[in-house]
Image (cartoon, helix red, strand yellow):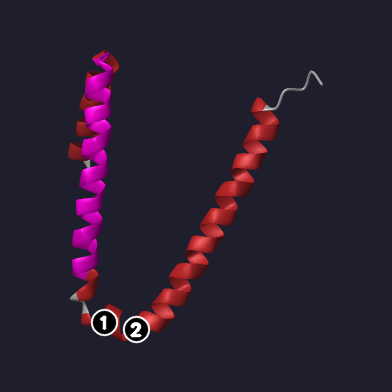
Amino acid sequence: MVTGIVLLIVGITIGFFITNTKMIHLVGKLIDITIFILLFFLGISVGVNDKIISNFDSIGLQAFLVTLAATVGSIAVSVLVYHLFFKNTDK
């Protein structure tokens, strides 16, 4: 945990000094590639786990419901924050 926090702080510090837009685009592409690789290996780990595969029907429904609730909650909080802090009240 401490390693993750230290790496995050180091990344923020380095990012603060990066002003080259080519470097920013490169970092964005590297992040995309890293996320795709992590998702690929997550898929492999799920595929080889017999407990997950045998209970996939019930896990799938639960995952769908959790995802739906998280999405609806995120939208609701986003609308609330927009109306509280960003909506122009001059009209």
The correct choice, above or below, for 84 with respect to 39 in the image is: above
Identify the image quadrant of residue 81: top right
Q: Quadrant of the N terminus?
A: top left
Q: Is residue 60 shown above or below 21? A: below
**Place of residue 28 in the rendered image (x, y in percent of width and height, measured from the top left):** 28, 33
Observer-nearest of 23 and 72: 23
Circle 1 packing at 10 Å, graded few (<14), some (14-19), many (20+), is few
What residue is rendered at 40% in x and 82% in y?
57
x then y, percent, for residue 46: 24, 71
Q: Are marks 1 and 2 in contact (CB under 8 Å)?
A: yes
**Residue at the (48%, 62%) spot, across then down:** 67
Q: Check residue 28 for magenta coloring.
A: yes
| Residue with the mark numbered 2 | 55
Q: Which residue is denoted by mark 1 in the rendering?
A: 51
Q: Position of residue 79 (x, y in %)?
A: 65, 41
Please give the range of residues in magenta. Answer: 18-45
Residue 22 lies, in percent from the top left, at 24, 21
- The amino acid sitting under disc 1 is Lys
Q: Is residue 88 left or right of residue 19?
A: right
